[in-house]
Image: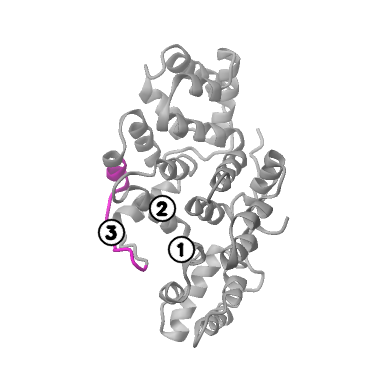
Amino acid sequence: MAQAQYHGTVQPAAHLNAEADAAALRKAMKGLGTDEAAIINVIAHRNNAQRQEIKIKYKLLHGRDLIEDLHSELGGHFRTAVLALMETKAVYDAHCLRNAMKGLGTDESVLIETLATRSNQINNHNTLYKCMNLYCPNMPAFKRNLEKDVVSETSGNFKRLLVSLCQGARDESPSVDHEKAKREAQELYEAGEKHWGTDESKFNFIIASRSLPQLKATFEEYAKIAKRDILSSIDREMSGDVKRAFKAVAQCAYARPAYFAERLHRSMQGAGTDDDTLIRLVVTRSEIDLAEIKQVFLASYGKTLTSWIEADVSGDYRKLLVAIVGPN
């Protein structure tokens, strides 16, 4: 089975000059006023690895911290998006997970989106969450254990699934074992359609450890046995956050861009905008599969993702997101 090929909208600059970029950013923030267009021109057209080079060069050249300067000079959602783009990918995910669980209440949707859709990179996130002093302006350093926080902030079957996903043990091989798919489809049917939760540990193990191509093959075999697809069975047999988490994994196995297109649409649908979700999705998918997400978004909702963003947000914040997402 051929593995799906995905593409980001942000590509590395062909001829990076980190020194020139650092100088341009300093010029944009020096003196009275800020040249937001110059900041967008640099940050939106460099990939994450290149932004890290620019961040190092900025401090070497100017003896100043780029993140602190950006935080001081910018504001609102534009600042939030710029700072998100300047984080390394794993550190940004760690911050999102921490923000989802700190204080009163828990944002379960962020836990699901991050833990249920990432590959073995979550192992790196767990290490960062536990061992690093992560710092950004107005946010204290923290040393925490991701799994312990998940256990503290969630409960029941949802907690057990997230703990399984926290292990970062998903097979990332593109190959598919069709006999295993048939066998495990039967096991899921026995644990689900007949008596959901009877063998929860087995169910969690399959969902959390099998590659997405392998899960897709398993779900296709499951549909033959159950006479309905796995998403319909999850809807029938589960509820609440655990249902949303299992569906997220299943949707990503079937067609990952469709899951994120739906999440983006929901962030802008109706009155108001869920800016945190919009920023997080654009930032985290920009170098992975945002090109395919744009295609699915247009096919599903009749308008381009760029046109939705242009209608929903404004100012430099809009210019930055449009620069990342790309033209219609």
Residue at the location (61% across, 36% down)? 255
Tell me residue 174's x, y (percent). Answer: 58, 38
Please give the label number shown on residue 96. 2
**For numbered disc 2, what is the local secondary structure?**
helix
Query: Magenta part mainly helix, strand or loop?
Result: loop
Is residue 169 shown above or below 123?
above
Q: Distance between the residues labelled 2 and 1?
A: 11 Å
Identified by mark 1, the residue type is Glu
The CA distance from mark 3 to mark 2 is 13 Å
Q: Residue 142 shows which numbered tag?
A: 3
Magenta residue span: 137-150
Q: Which residue position is annotated with label 1?
A: 87
Q: Residues within 10 Å of mark 3 (few under 14, many from 20)?
A: some
Reading the chain from its start, which is encountered first: label 2 or label 1? Answer: 1
Q: What element carries label 1?
A: loop
Tell me the element at label 3. Answer: loop
User: Quadrant location of the N terminus?
Assistant: top right
Query: How far across and down, in percent of the image, does residue 211 sit?
Result: 52, 35
Identify which residue is drawn at 46% across, 63% down.
87
For discs 2 and 1, the disc positioned in front in the rendered view: 2
Amino acid type of disc 2?
A: Cys
Circles 3 and 1, Cβ within 8 Å, touching? The answer is no
Left or right of 248: which side holds 295? right
The answer to whether residue 204 is magenta is: no
Which disc number belongs to residue 70?
none
Q: How far apart are marks 3 and 1 (CA)?
A: 16 Å
In the image, residue 74 lies at what x, y percent? 48, 72
Q: In which quarter of the image is the C terminus?
A: bottom right
